[in-house]
């Protein structure tokens, strides 16, 4: 009995372990670098998955095009029950009754045909153009996939930086709260000893409460920023995510290296390649429209088994087979100018895509120049805000010393504290703007692939 219980216990443990390996855990904790988040998004983000499926769909589309030139075989079956056999009128001369018509029924009550049709393209201009365009069609889906990956990379990176900046903002708020709490405790003690007025305590308490509320708001926004990051990654919201990278790991200065001002930046962008591919496809469409004016030639064949009888039970006892092979030449002559108008439409579409290709060069170059200026401006603003932050911190330190020595007022301390908080907020905003401009710069110069 004990052995049986032990066996079932072991089986239960094995089943539990195997199920744990199959079913993904919920609420799993991930510790990711920025690159880990990007790689996760490449595998789980819906837009990337759909773009990858588009490549598979393009593969099947290419196979469909190729299949049009392979032998086409169709089978058919027919059964007919003539409730009333058709009647034909024959001249009476055949029956010795000139000047009259004699009704005669031809055929049998039951008929059945089994047929097999075979055709093979020998020459078709549209099919030949389709074969030439198949690689370009697949290339379009692949470049769309690359563009989707770049956009996903950009969105994930910006969301990742937003979380890092929010964490930095909380650190600054904590530092301000700690020093403000010490000052509040010290001023409260001095007030009890009669050295300072109650209004000085109230000013600091008001400032401390406002700063504490601001911190709580930032924490709630941080939770939302984490959710946004997981959304951009395609990660379920209930999963736990921690970030391993720090702001110190982001080398903003390195982004300014190798920035050129030539007019060939657009060549690094996948968007330009997409427009080029679209022009190629439109060129093939024009060729296909012209090929529609050419004759087409097919080899055809047919085999039919015909069964006829007045008795249903004996219908398939008599077989009357027939077969043929041949060639079918189709020469387009006139179809109400439809082919001509279709060709003109595709030519206009080609002209528009060529105009778009020409225009996108300037657009991408302008985007790169704009991103470069925004990055330099962002870096200059960040450095300025960083210096202002240090100055505000020094002003607060000196103001507090003067207040403690009795040569300064509490209002000056409060103003210095407010100035430091304002400098911190501007520094945080400048930091995020610089990080975003770095991402936009990398994208504009084709560094993200």
Image (cartoon, helix red, strand yellow):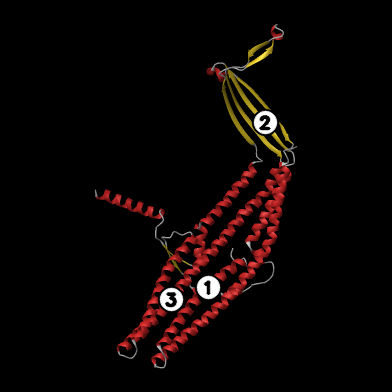
Q: CA distance from mark 2 to mark 1?
A: 71 Å
Secondary structure, mark 1, is loop
Q: CA distance from mark 3 to mark 2?
A: 82 Å
Circle 3 Cα neighbour tier, 10 Å, few/some/many (<14 / 14–19 / ≥20)? few
Front one among 142 and 443: 443
Secondary structure, mark 3, is helix
Query: Who's the residue at 40% across and 55% down the image?
Result: 21
Q: Image quarter for residue 154? A: bottom right
Counting from the top left corner in percent of width and height, residue 84 is at: 57, 17
Query: Who's the residue at 61% across and 24% down the image?
Result: 305
Which callout, 2 or 1, points at the residue further toward the start of the chain?
Answer: 1
Q: Which residue is mark 3?
A: 171
Q: Which residue is mark 2?
A: 301
Is 260 rendered above or below residue 150?
below
Quadrant the C terminus occupies: bottom right
Q: Which residue is mark 1?
A: 250
Is 184 rendered above or below residue 241?
below
Front one among 173 and 306: 173
Secondary structure, mark 2, is strand
Circle 2 Cα neighbour tier, 10 Å, few/some/many (<14 / 14–19 / ≥20)? some
Is 310 rendered above or below residue 127?
above
65 vs 167, left or right, is right
Query: Who's the residue at 38% across and 52% down the image?
Result: 19
């Amino acid at each position: 009995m004990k052995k049986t219980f032990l066996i079932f216990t072991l089986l239960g443990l094995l089943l539990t372990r195997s199920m744990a390996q199959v079913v993904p855990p919920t609420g799993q904790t991930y510790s990711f670098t920025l690159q880990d988040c990007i790689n996760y998004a490449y595998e789980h983000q819906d837009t990337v998955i759909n773009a990858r499926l588009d490549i598979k769909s393009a593969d099947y589309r290419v196979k469909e095009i190729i299949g049009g030139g392979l032998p086409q075989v169709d089978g058919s079956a027919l059964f007919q029950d003539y409730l009333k056999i058709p009647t034909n009128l024959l001249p009476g001369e055949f029956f010795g009754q000139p000047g009259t018509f004699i009704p005669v029924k031809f055929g049998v009550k039951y008929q059945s045909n089994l047929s097999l049709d075979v055709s093979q393209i020998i020459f078709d201009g549209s099919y030949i153009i389709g074969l030439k365009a198949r690689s370009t069609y697949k290339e379009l889906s692949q470049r769309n996939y690359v563009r989707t990956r770049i956009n996903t990379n950009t969105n994930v990176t910006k969301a990742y930086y937003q979380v890092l900046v929010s964490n930095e903002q909380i650190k600054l708020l904590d530092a301000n709260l700690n020093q403000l709490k010490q000052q509040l405790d010290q001023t409260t003690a001095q007030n009890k000893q009669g050295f300072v007025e109650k209004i000085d305590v109230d000013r600091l308490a008001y400032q401390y409460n406002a700063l504490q509320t601001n911190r709580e708001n930032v924490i709630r926004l941080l939770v939302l920023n984490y959710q946004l990051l997981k959304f951009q990654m395609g990660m379920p919201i209930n999963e736990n995510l921690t970030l391993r990278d720090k702001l110190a790991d982001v080398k903003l200065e390195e982004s300014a290296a190798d920035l050129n001002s030539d007019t060939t930046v657009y060549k690094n962008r996948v968007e330009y390649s997409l427009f080029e591919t679209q022009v190629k496809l439109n060129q093939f469409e024009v060729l296909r429209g012209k090929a529609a004016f050419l004759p087409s030639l097919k080899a055809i064949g047919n085999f039919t088994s015909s069964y006829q009888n007045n008795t249903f039970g004996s219908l398939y006892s008599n077989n009357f087979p027939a077969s043929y092979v041949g060639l079918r030449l189709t020469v387009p002559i006139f179809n109400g100018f439809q082919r001509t108008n279709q060709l003109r439409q595709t030519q206009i579409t080609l002209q528009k895509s060529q105009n778009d290709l020409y225009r996108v060069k300037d657009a991408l170059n302008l985007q790169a120049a704009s991103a470069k200026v925004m990055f330099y401006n962002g870096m200059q603003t960040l450095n300025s805000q960083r210096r202002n932050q240090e100055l505000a911190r020094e002003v607060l330190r000196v103001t507090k010393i003067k207040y403690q020595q009795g040569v300064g007022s509490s209002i000056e301390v409060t103003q210095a504290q407010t100035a430091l908080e304002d400098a911190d907020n501007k520094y945080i905003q400048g930091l995020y703007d610089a990080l975003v401009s770095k991402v936009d710069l990398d994208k504009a110069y084709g560094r993200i692939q």
